[in-house]
Structures are given as C-alpha cells and as structure tokens.
Amino acid sequence: MANQSTLPRELIEGRPALIVIDIQASTFIDDSAVRAIDNMPGYKERMLAARTAIDAARANDIPVIFVQEVHRPDGIDFGRELDGAEDAHCLENALGTALAIQQMDVRQDDYVVPKRRYSAFFGTDFEILLRGLKVETLLLVGGLTDVCVHYTFVDGHQSDYFCRVIEECVGGSSIPAHEAALNAMEYLQTGARRSLAETVNAMNSFGGTAPE
C-alpha cells in the first residue's frame, strides 16, 4: 500500500445507517435462465443474508434505508443505462420491481429512497435523509456489487462518509466483477470490506453505547 500513514478506523464511526440497495422482488420470483441483468452464482443467498444485518440494525436502533431502482414504463429515464449489457428492468408497477418486503421485513415506517440511476445519491433525496439522521457511516448491502453498490459507495466516499460493504451480503453480475468491485472500494477506504459477523458485533456495540 502506497499510503503508509493511513490511520486505522473503527468499523462504525459516528452514527451509522444500514443501506439496503436494490433487494427487490425479482430476485426471489424470477428464476429465468436469461435475465435482464446477470447475477453471479449464489446471488439470491447473498441477498437473503442481508436480512441478518437488517435484524441487527433494528435491534440496535440503527436506521435501515431501502434503496429501490425503478424506471418509468416508457423507459424515458434509462438514459445510457441500456447501452451496455443490461436489458430493460425495474419498470414501475412490474411485480419484480417491488421491494422484497417479506424476505427483508420491510415495514411501513421504513425509509425508502427510489432512484432512477445506479447511485443512491444521484437525483434523489438520499443525502438530505442522511443529514437529517446525522449519519456518518454507511453500511452497504445488496446489489449489484459492481454497479449500484459500487457507485453508491463512490458517491458516499466523495461526500466524506465512512463507507463499509458487508461482503457476504452483496452480489455482483459475475464473480470476477464482484471481486474487482470489492477491491476497488477497499482501495478508496482501507477497511471498507467487512464480514457480516464483525459488522453485527459492531452494531451490537453501538447499540450498547448509543444515546437514547
């Protein structure tokens, strides 16, 4: 590592929030061999593992923010998104576009941030919500590791948030793309890659010390 002066950071710095990125119904109802977006092997299981992080966040009064990709039926807001490998996806009112309510235990009073593009920050009120909650650390789960998780991480990094990605709870378009994205995020913030077990432990420690 070129920067030998990097200071060690806690997994959670200041107030955290768990950011659940694009865990939507299509993951659990679409078993098609050919999908609009490629998923790496074991993708569904990785999304299900995010429920452990959600339950731990709730138990420790850590805000859970669900990010939902959604596009207008006429595709006007896709922009250049369909110029690559992805086909049309996450159209309004399609069954698969809904959040995975049962699997992720989405509740009426949860925070939901709809987005039209990859990053949760781009063209949304996400940062206004984070400021209102006084959040400093973003704990990221969901997919795709190499697209929406990575781009949200980068924008969070550039906005001076501490960003952590829970490795077992994210999945990419392929295994190489997944690993490359995790490495790229670790490059930006040393200690960004975290295990589910250590993140839950950090949540529990935060819950034991968080102010009322």
Image: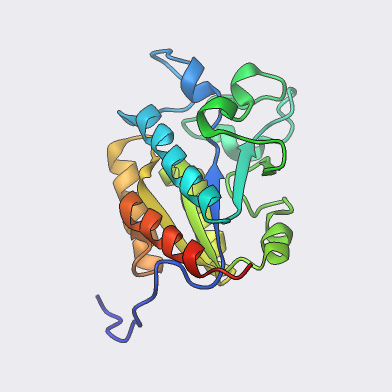
Locate the N terminus by quadrant. bottom left
Q: Residue 110 appears in which quarter of the rendering?
A: top right
- Front-most of residues 195 and 85: 195
Locate the C terminus by quadrant. bottom right
- Front-most of residues 212 and 179: 212
Q: Residue 74 appears in which quarter of the rendering?
A: top right
Residue at 34 percent of width and 78 percent of height = 8
Work out whether 119 lies above or below 106: below
Residue 195 in view here = no
Residue 66 placement (x, y as % from top left): 61, 43
Residue 63 placement (x, y as % from top left): 60, 54
Residue at 34 percent of width and 66 percent of height = 191
Q: Residue 211 appears in which quarter of the rendering?
A: bottom right
Residue furthest left as drawn: 1
Count the numbered circles shown: 0
Residue at 73 percent of width and 22 percent of height = 73
Residue 28 in view here = yes
Residue 152 placement (x, y as % from top left): 54, 53
Residue furthest bottom as drawn: 5
Asked whether, in this view, residue 205 is left or right of residue 106, the answer is left
Asked whether, in this view, residue 159 is left or right of residue 128, the answer is left
Work out whether 168 lies above or below 211: above
Residue at 56 percent of width and 28 percent of height = 100
> Is the image coloured rainbow, by chain, by secondary structure, or in one colour?
rainbow
Work out whether 155 lies above or below 4: above
Residue 171 placement (x, y as % from top left): 38, 38
